[in-house]
Image: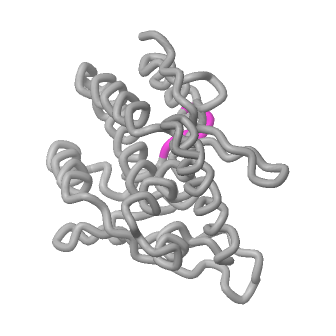
Amino acid sequence: MLPIELKNSYLVGQTAITYLTEEQVNALTIAFQNWYDKSTGIYHKKRGNYWLVFLVLRFTGARISEVINAKYGDIDFRNAEMRLITLKRHNPKKRNQTRIVPVPPQVTSEIATFLAQYPDIKDRLFLIDRSNFYRVFQERCQEAGIPKELSHPHILRHTRAIELLRTGVPVTIVQDLLGHSALTTTAVYLRISGQEAKNILREKGLV
């Protein structure tokens, strides 16, 4: 595929915040699913782990270390929720707190289907080799036409934050869902949304 050339990077202060557009994240999801679906035998089982980790990253906005540390018992299949340990805290007294993150029912359904096929992996559901996952992630991004500079798992965290705020989720709820220790961290994404609005108005000749 040809690279998808859409503006999805903003400079906030001295920090460049990058994220995937809706088109890009959909293309990446399809690339991951095709990579998993076309595999057979032992490769289907291994790729299944990677596919599930991708889905959880995509729809929780969690850090990859938080997903890797998640266990089967952290999944609430009935309510389509996951309990995640918030691993990155600046305040030592608040470390290792947990948060509940809702996910689409399709995610828990995908996990349940995988476990029905491979019940022995129940206790190692999200245990993957992180460096290998990065490589696989970059390969799927290339297939999806996503530029190399956007081809890293953490970009799904930025993408989910932008996605939630765009749909009107209050910033304090986004803070809780992402496990940010300070509201000011989450508020950075609000500034991005404001810049986007200004750019759109300029493109339309309204300002």
| Magenta residue span | 128-132
Is 93 left or right of 175, judged from the image as shown? right
Percent x, y of residue 115: 21, 50
Residue at 36% from the left image edge and 38% from the top image edge = 51
* Secondary structure mostly taken by the magenta-highlighted segment of the chain: helix
Residue 130 on the magenta span: yes
Residue at 19% from the left image edge and 59% from the top image edge = 105
Residue at 57% from the left image edge and 81% from the top image edge = 97
Residue 141 on the magenta span: no
Along the line of sight, the residue nearer the viewer: 87 or 188: 188
Q: Eyeballing the image, is 125 above or below 24?
A: below
Q: Residue furthest front?
A: 206
Is residue 142 among the parts visible in the rendering? yes
Along the line of sight, the residue nearer the viewer: 205 or 143: 205
Is residue 119 among the parts visible in the rendering? no
Locate the N terminus and report the quarter of the image it occupies.
top left
Is 131 left or right of 197, judged from the image as shown? right
Along the line of sight, the residue nearer the viewer: 74 or 42: 74
Look at the image and name its color scheme. one colour
Q: Eyeballing the image, is 31 above or below 171?
A: above
Q: Residue furthest top?
A: 2
Q: Residue furthest right?
A: 14
Residue at 75% from the left image edge and 82% from the top image edge = 91
